[in-house]
């Protein structure tokens, strides 16, 4: 099998703590790729000759924003197509979201996928076009949604959005074993010590 893309889990730390998360992302998680480790991954990928895409995901990638920008910039300079997965917690409105995205666009970002619905922090709900997606569309990025249910209103129906670039939707797979809910269900029942009654 030819390896054509690599997805780097930049960190396990996340602003949310979704029950279905199969990487157990949470605010309590620690660890992040260093720039040196990223460079090592880039060089190994480049030496393979078949890898053309680098995705940066987590956890929540925007928590380590300066490292994320450097990662996109370096991957782009080496000729890789670049993508980010985020839960979009930073996207309060379209104008502010454009400010967040601009340094990444300038660094060479090609694609962004935003995980959002009522199962991802319930920040915006499934009925609203996510401001981060709208902002991404303004920059001409390839933008799509990751969610458990199909988005009710895709961003492509909103004005100012490139219709061919924002229709994507990827189902968040909750059917395979993983995540905190499954973990709890599989955990053995707690058995306490039986204390003799003293009458
Ligand atoms: S937003 Fe994504 S990475 Fe964060 S806890 Fe939820 S599923 Fe995991």
Image (cartoon, helix red, strand yellow):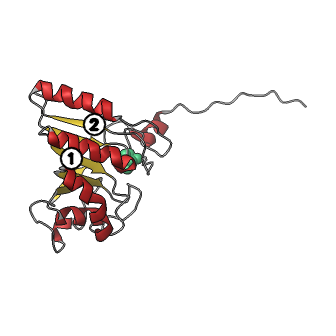
Instruction: Please give the residue where the numbered disc 2 appears in the rendered image.
Output: 8
User: Which numbered marker is on residue 32?
Assistant: none
Task: Note whether 5 is above or below 17 in the view shown.
Answer: above
Instruction: Please give the residue where the numbered disc 1 appears in the rendered image.
Output: 83
Task: Note whether 151 is above or below 78 in the view shown.
Answer: below
For the residue with label 2, is its CB less than 8 Å from the closest atom of ligand 1?
no
The quadrant of the image that shows the C terminus is top right
Task: Note whether 171 is above or below 95 in the view shown.
Answer: above
- The quadrant holding residue 137 is bottom left
The quadrant of the image that shows the N terminus is top left
> In the depicted view, which residue is nearer to us: 36 or 58?
36
Q: Are marks 1 and 2 in contact (CB under 8 Å)?
A: no
Q: Residue at x 28, y 55 (%)?
A: 114
Whether residue 174 is visible here, answered yes or no, is no
Report x, y in % for residue 105: 20, 55
The earlier-in-sequence mark between 1 and 2 is 2
Q: Which residue is drawn at 23% across and 45% down?
A: 72
| Figure label count | 2
Q: Which residue lies furthest to the bottom in this view?
A: 159
Whether residue 48 is visible here, answered yes or no, is yes
Report x, y in % for residue 14: 42, 47
Q: Using residue 184 as the reference point, say whether residue 99 is left or right of it.
A: left
Q: What element carries label 2?
A: strand
Report x, y in % for residue 157: 16, 71
Q: Using residue 103 as the reference point, say whether residue 66 is left or right of it.
A: right
Q: Residue at x 57, y 33 (%)?
A: 189
Report x, y in % for residue 145: 24, 56
Q: Is mark 1 on a helix, strand or loop?
A: strand
CA distance for labels 1 and 2: 10 Å
Task: Note whether 26 is above or below 120 in the view shown.
Answer: above
């Amino acid at each position: 099998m030819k390896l054509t893309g690599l997805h780097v889990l930049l960190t396990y730390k996340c602003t949310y703590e979704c029950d279905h998360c199969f990487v157990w992302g949470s605010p309590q998680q620690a660890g992040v790729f260093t720039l040196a480790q990223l460079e090592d991954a880039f060089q190994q990928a480049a030496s393979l000759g078949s890898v053309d895409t680098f995705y940066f995901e987590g956890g929540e990638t925007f928590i380590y924003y300066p490292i994320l920008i450097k990662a996109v910039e370096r991957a782009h300079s080496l000729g890789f197509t670049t993508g980010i997965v985020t839960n979009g917690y930073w996207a309060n409105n379209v104008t502010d979201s454009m400010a967040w995205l601009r340094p990444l666009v300038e660094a060479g970002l090609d694609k962004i996928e935003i995980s959002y619905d009522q199962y991802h922090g319930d920040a915006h709900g499934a009925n609203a076009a996510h401001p981060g997606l709208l902002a991404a569309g303004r920059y001409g990025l390839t933008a799509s949604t990751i969610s458990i249910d199909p988005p009710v209103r895709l961003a492509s129906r909103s004005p100012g959005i490139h219709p061919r670039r924002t229709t994507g939707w990827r189902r968040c797979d909750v059917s395979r074993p993983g995540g905190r809910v499954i973990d709890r269900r599989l955990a053995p029942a707690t058995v306490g010590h039986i204390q003799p009654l003293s009458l």
